[in-house]
Each structure stands twice: as structure tokens, then as C-alpha cells.
Image (tube, grey):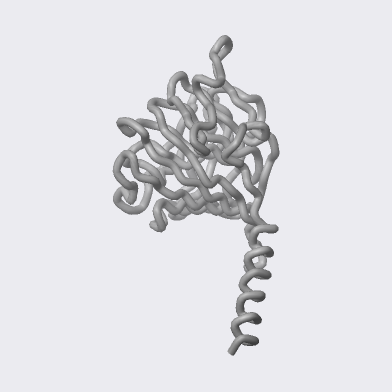
């Protein structure tokens, strides 16, 4: 019995170590050294994005975003968020590329209250196919194109933590909010880039932000 228990424990530890090796921590709960902040000139960055009690605090005002310093492709992104006051607007920016502008060219996984799970195409060239329909921004004067989520809102009330699990590959993007699949799109026009979090509307917090590789062979 002791030998069986010891073998089981060692197997669990080995599996856990392997999983940890595959995990890329994007937010270390201590600082923002591996992130780039994009805000209007003359704005104090610390007033908008900072670490508080191990969480990433975002003021929501003014509009801007914080993005990873590294570019990523073919991954599963996990993050958790909560509104600390009245729920407002925000988003997870996927496959950011080009110049850092407010707002950049990318595909957004919406975080606006009651709309978490929507897709938002941002900027000319952003596109994805949902339910066999192509949503593509071709007009340079069109900045946004929204694709509504599948299910009713699966968000928790203000003050409670929510989870976002986002699978990004060369061929598809899937958005899962608190365990509910809210959107699925094929053939995104942007397949790699930086990952960003918006400041847009109201105070909120993020935690447990990490990536695991997406196995395209599965």
C-alpha cells in the first residue's frame, strides 16, 4: 500500500511539474516589467495600470491598453477578472500588430458588462468567419465590427471573479466565459501578435493571466 501511494504521489508531482513547465506566466503578481503600456501622452501610467494586492488594477480612465512585450501564436490564454465598482467596458486584445495606437489593429474578446464573449474586429483587415459568415473590416474608416456571443450572459455579479479561457490558433478562436462557450470563429485574418488588456470605462482587476501551448495535432 505504501509503495502504491508513493508511486501515485510521484506520478502526480511529475505531471504537475510538466504542466508548470508548459505554462507561460504573463502576469507575475509583482510588477509589470514584461508589459508595455499604451496611453495618451502626459498620462501617469501608474494611475491607470498598477499592481495592487497581487492583482493587476486597471482604472478604466482614460482609454488605453497594456500589452505583452512578446508576440504569441497557437495558445490557450487563461485570465480572471472582476469589476470593483459598477461594471463598464473593457476587452482582451488578441493578435495585436502594427503600431501601438488607441485602438490597435487586432481581434478583441469583449469584456463589456453583459457582453463578455462577443468578438469585436478592430481596424482595417481584422476579420473572422462565424457560422459560415465572414466578418471583415475593409473600409479604413470603419474601426469596429461586433459579433454577438452565442449564449446569454454567463458573467458573475460585480465584485465576483470571472474566468476567460481563450483558444487561439491559425485556424480558429474560441471564447469561453466561466465555462460557457460564448463564441467560435474560423480563419482569423490575424493569427499571431501581442496580447493586451483594455482600460475603457471603469475600475477592474485581473489575476492568474497565463498561456499554455495549443497542440495543433489534437
Residue at 40% x, 53% y is 178
Residue at 47% x, 51% y is 175
Q: Nearer the viewer, residue 131 or 48?
A: 48
Q: Is residue 150 above or below residue 86?
A: below
Q: Which image quadrant is residue 16 in?
A: bottom right
The quarter of the picture where the N terminus appears is bottom right
Q: Residue furthest top?
A: 42
Q: Position of residue 162 (x, y in %)?
A: 40, 47
Q: Position of residue 125 (x, y in %)?
A: 58, 35
Marker count (numbered): 0
The quarter of the picture where the C terminus appears is bottom right
Q: Position of residue 186 (x, y in %)?
A: 53, 53
Q: Residue furthest front?
A: 2
Q: Residue furthest bottom?
A: 1
Q: Is residue 84 above or below residue 3?
A: above
Q: Nearer the viewer, residue 10 or 82?
A: 10
Residue at 43% x, 40% y is 110
Residue at 31% x, 39% y is 158
Q: Specify whether 217 is left or right of 129.
A: right
Q: Nearer the viewer, residue 93 or 146?
A: 93
Q: Position of residue 65 (x, y in %)?
A: 54, 28
Q: Nearer the viewer, residue 117 or 62?
A: 62
Q: Is residue 34 above or below residue 148?
A: above
Amino acid at each position: 500500500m505504501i509503495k502504491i501511494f508513493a508511486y501515485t504521489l510521484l506520478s502526480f508531482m511529475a505531471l504537475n511539474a510538466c504542466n508548470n513547465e508548459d505554462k507561460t506566466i504573463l502576469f507575475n503578481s509583482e510588477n509589470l516589467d514584461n508589459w508595455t503600456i499604451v496611453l495618451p501622452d502626459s498620462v501617469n501610467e501608474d494611475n491607470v495600470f498598477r499592481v495592487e494586492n497581487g492583482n493587476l488594477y486597471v482604472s478604466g480612465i482614460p482609454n488605453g491598453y497594456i500589452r505583452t512585450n512578446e508576440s504569441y501564436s497557437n495558445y490557450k490564454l487563461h485570465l480572471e477578472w472582476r469589476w470593483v465598482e459598477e461594471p463598464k467596458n473593457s476587452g482582451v486584445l488578441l493578435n495585436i500588430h502594427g503600431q501601438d495606437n488607441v485602438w490597435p489593429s487586432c481581434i478583441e474578446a469583449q469584456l463589456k458588462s453583459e457582453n463578455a464573449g462577443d468578438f469585436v474586429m478592430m481596424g482595417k483587415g481584422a476579420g473572422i468567419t462565424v457560422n459560415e459568415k465572414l466578418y471583415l473590416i475593409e473600409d479604413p474608416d470603419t474601426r469596429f465590427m461586433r459579433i454577438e456571443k452565442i449564449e446569454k450572459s454567463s458573467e458573475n455579479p460585480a465584485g465576483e471573479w470571472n474566468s476567460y479561457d481563450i483558444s487561439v490558433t491559425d485556424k480558429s478562436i474560441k471564447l469561453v466565459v466561466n465555462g460557457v462557450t460564448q463564441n467560435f470563429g474560423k480563419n482569423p485574418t490575424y493569427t499571431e501578435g501581442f496580447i493586451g488588456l483594455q482600460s475603457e470605462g471603469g475600475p477592474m482587476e485581473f489575476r492568474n493571466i497565463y498561456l499554455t501551448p495549443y497542440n495543433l495535432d489534437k
